[in-house]
Amino acid sequence: MPRLELTDRELVVHLTAWESILSLRRSFRVPLAHVRGATEDNGFGGGALGLRIPGTYLPGLIAAGTFIKGSDRQFVYTSRKLQTIVIELAGNDWARLVIGVPDVRAAATRINAAVARRH
């Protein structure tokens, strides 16, 4: 599962080698100034994600990569075994990050606290 790391200035998404292969993306950083907030959304399913370009999608198992819906691009890496956090972004290549985490409430609380401290 991807690992989210918060620093004073950025949100870092760490991907393992296997996750990088499935999502066709390496680990990356998002300036904390671009993060608007985080919420849990366990109803975020394949149909809601849009068109996958590029990445991997196996219905009911895994969604990984860049998905486009309307004019929004989102980076997704989640699976059926994980809870889903949606991190809204502004001024970034993606409109949001949809990431599977083991404890969505704790992750959202940490991210939202970091965003509040930043403002």
Image: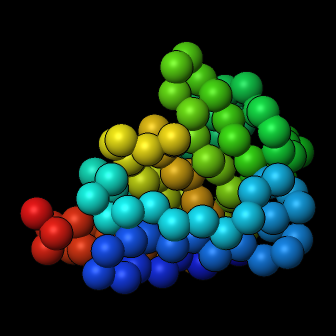
Q: Position of residue 18 (x, y in %)?
A: 88, 71
Q: Residue furthest top?
A: 70
Colouring of the image: rainbow
Give the total number of marks visible in the rendering: 0
Q: Is residue 11 left or right of residue 74?
A: left
Image height check: is 63 above or below 33?
above
**Residue in the image at 38% along x and 71% along y:** 10
Q: Is residue 71 left or right of residue 110?
A: right
Q: Is residue 91 left or right of residue 66?
A: left
Q: Nearer the viewer, residue 52 or 43?
A: 52
**Residue in the image at 59% along x and 23% along y:** 69
Q: Position of residue 6 (x, y in %)?
A: 40, 79
Q: Nearer the viewer, residue 19 or 46?
A: 19
**Residue in the image at 27% along x and 59% along y:** 33
Q: Is residue 7 visible?
A: yes
Q: Position of residue 117 (x, y in %)?
A: 14, 74
